[in-house]
Image (spheres, grey):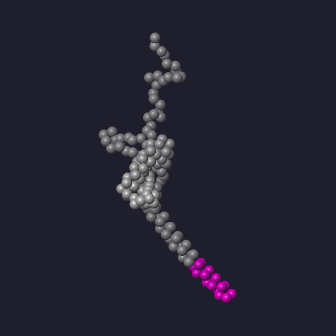
Amino acid sequence: MSEQPDSDSETRDDEPEPEAAATPEPHDVRPASAGSAVKVLGVERYVQFGFIAMAGIIFWILDKVLVLVWDIWAEPNTTVVSAIAFASGVAVAVGLYFHPRLNSLATEVGIELSKVSWPTRKETYSATIIVLITSVIAAVYLGVLDFFWSAITDLIYQTKA
């Protein structure tokens, strides 16, 4: 006796798969082309680089702190201190990378940053020139104002003396 699937609870073989399953996630690793073995990481490479940079920062901070603390009791062995700091930095970064919520947050930040429209080289050059000119004008204006204010205060304090 074969069971008939309920039309509401089970899908039949002749029904197409939902479209959402066909769209790739933004951080999926996909081949660049069908004949290419090169993998494109997309936003995920920035997330991974961020966690690697975090491991380096943790290593650097722990190395300095451990040397300071160890120096209280004895001369620190820099090789041991650096090894402990390196292992701790890598362990913390790997642990945080595999934390689902934090990795998801970092990936979402990377996705949002990839949507930013960054200025072109020409726009950056123009904006830099504008900032420099504005800074020079402000410096000259404040210098002239300071010169006159100093002259006025010198006159006031000289007459009362």
Residue at the outermost front position: 73
> Where in the figure is residue 124, as x and y percent of width and height?
46, 62
Secondary structure predominantly adopted by residues drawn in magenta: helix
Q: Quadrant of residue 147?
A: bottom right
Name the one closer to the observer, 156 or 138: 156
Name which residue lies at 41% across and 53% down.
85
Q: How many marks?
A: 0
User: Is residue 10 visible from the viewing direction of this image?
Assistant: yes
Name which residue lies at 37% across and 54% down.
80
Whether residue 149 is in magenta: the answer is yes
Residue at the outermost top position: 1
Q: Is residue 147 left or right of residue 103?
A: right
26 vs 160: above or below: above
Name which residue lies at 40% across and 59% down.
76
138 vs 91: above or below: below
Name which residue lies at 65% across and 88% down.
158
> Where in the figure is residue 113, as x and y percent of width and height?
48, 51
Q: Is residue 138 left or right of residue 69?
A: right
> Where in the figure is residue 49, as x and y percent of width and height?
41, 50
Q: Quadrant of the C terminus?
A: bottom right
> Where in the figure is residue 17, as x and y percent of width and height?
45, 29
Q: Which residues are magenta?
A: 144-161
User: Is residue 64 visible from the viewing direction of this image?
Assistant: no
Name the one closer to the observer, 146 or 123: 146
Residue at the outermost right position: 160
Whether residue 46 is in magenta: the answer is no
